[in-house]
Amino acid sequence: MKDEGVRLSMVTCYDAWSARLLARSSVDALLVGDSVSMVMHGHPSTVHADLEMMRLHTAAVRRGDPEAFVVADMPFPLHRLGPARAMEAVDVLAKAGATAVKIEGARGHLDTVEHIVESGFPVMGHLGLTPQSVHQLGGYRVQGRDEAAAEQIFEDSQALEAAGCFALVLECVPKALAERISRALRIPTIGIGSGPGCDGQILVLHDMLGMNPGFKPRFLRTFLDGAGAVTGAVDAYAEAVRAGDFPNKRESFL
Ligand code: KIV
């Protein structure tokens, strides 16, 4: 698709119900992101996702859409514990139904990325704002604004491609840096908050559906008033129950 100039679209997906719905859409691939720990479990960061959480949600997504290209996040800090421990995690996620794993960062675990790829399992990289490092980054901030930081992200992107990654998520980096990386790599870049120069885009499904009305970062476009639609529908149901209008005769067994 990159060679043909066709942009890829991805969204996060955490459960069978939404996987079934997404199977009816034209989105190209699904990510069982470790953002599941925040979006679905209410944790304050993605470091709260563990392998069991990722296994359960990956398996649910796979049951919901047997055909999808499903990328599962490697939970912190399993990719930092050496290639053997990381391979055990890959095994769990693969058996749960993942087509590929996504691993944040590069420096210090390129050997692990290489080992997983050489073992025959696809790895997607993730650079820029890597949420598992939020405490070290000092918050959810745009990364690579100064020359040295931009150069480091550029070099890491080259290293991840050389290590065998099949694609690279670029999260919250300046548009010009994302364009430079996307032009320099043969593998596709998938941007979130990184401008239109990436080869594809990814958004958290709940955010783009407007399920999270207080969350309005600059990069987010909401394609639905999901919160309004859901609360409106549930209010209509509650009102129908109170009014004695639900269930009616047709909705009751004779
Ligand atoms: O966990 C996640 O949802 C992600 C995306 C934001 C890329 O990593």
Image: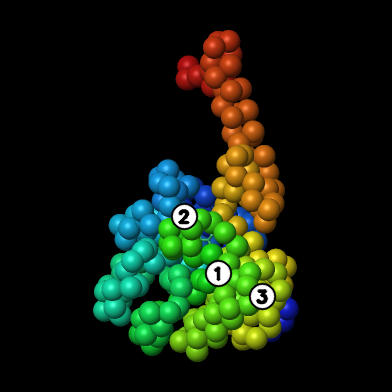
Relative horizontal placement of residue 48, taking residue 211 as reference (left or right): left
First-in-chain label (1 vs 3): 1
What residue lies at 53% left-to-right and 72% top-to-bottom? 127
Residue identifier under label 2: 35
Rate crowding at label 1 as few (under 14), some (14 to 19) or many (20 or more) other CA atoms within 10 Å.
many
Relative horizontal placement of residue 94, taking residue 22 as reference (left or right): left
Say which quadrant the N terminus sits in: bottom right
What residue lies at 62% left-to-right and 85% top-to-bottom? 185
Nearer to the camera, 130 or 143: 143
Residue 194, image x, y percentages: 65, 66
Say whether residue 67 is visible.
no
Nearer to the camera, 166 or 218: 218
Rate crowding at label 3 as few (under 14), some (14 to 19) or many (20 or more) other CA atoms within 10 Å.
many
Quadrant assignment, res 95: bottom left
Residue 238, image x, y percentages: 54, 19
Numbered circle sitting on residue 177: 3
Numbered circle sitting on residue 188: none
Nearer the observer, disc 2 or disc 1? 1
Nearer to the camera, 80 or 221: 80
Relative horizontal placement of residue 87, taking residue 194 as reference (left or right): left
Say whether residue 132 is visible.
yes
Numbered circle sitting on residue 128: 1
Q: Secondary structure at mark 1?
A: strand
Nearer the observer, disc 2 or disc 3? 3
Circle 3: residue type: Leu
